[in-house]
Image (cartoon, rainbow, N blue to C red):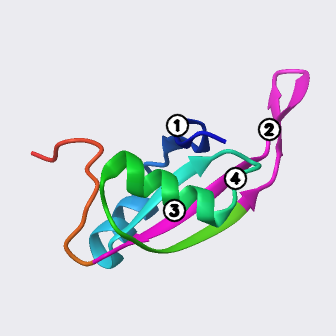
Amino acid sequence: MQTTQVIRRPCVTEKSIQSSEAANKVVFEVDMKANKAQVKRAVEELFKVTVLKVNTLHVPAKQVRLGRRQGMRPPWKKAVVTLKEGDKIEFFETA
């Protein structure tokens, strides 16, 4: 699997922003088939940082409703990446 296929997008939520400021952690949505070693290699190559630890978890599918119609949101995989002290990844500029 190529490094550009492993990481889908950053997960930017209030909780992930607080963890990035407090504990130098970044959260990504990754491919369901990717393992921790592939995520570590992809983050180090794409962002030129040093990764200390990678934690992954599966987010299960959710049932959603729009009026009378029901459907399912697809399941996805989340990776919490701990960076070395001094390294950081900025997704957007803070004013």
What residue appears at the point 29 percent right and 55 percent down from the top-left corner? 89
Label 3 with label 4: CB-CB less than 8 Å: no
- Which element is circle 1 on? helix
The label on residue 74 is: 2
The label on residue 34 is: 4
What residue appears at the point 49 percent right and 51 percent down from the top-left corner? 42
Discs 2/3, front: 3
- On screen, residue 87 versus residue 64, left or right, reads left
Magenta stretch, main secondary structure, is strand
Which of pointers 2 and 4 lies earlier in the amino acid sequence?
A: 4
Q: Which residue is mark 1?
A: 4
Q: Which residue is mark 3?
A: 40
User: Mark 2: which amino acid?
Assistant: Pro
User: Mark 4: which amino acid?
Assistant: Ala
- Which element is circle 2 on? loop
Residue 61 falls within the magenta-colored stretch:
yes
Residue that protrudes farthest toward the left in the picture: 95
Which of pointers 2 and 1 lies earlier in the amino acid sequence?
A: 1
Q: In this rendered view, identify the residue nearer to me: 91 or 38.
A: 38
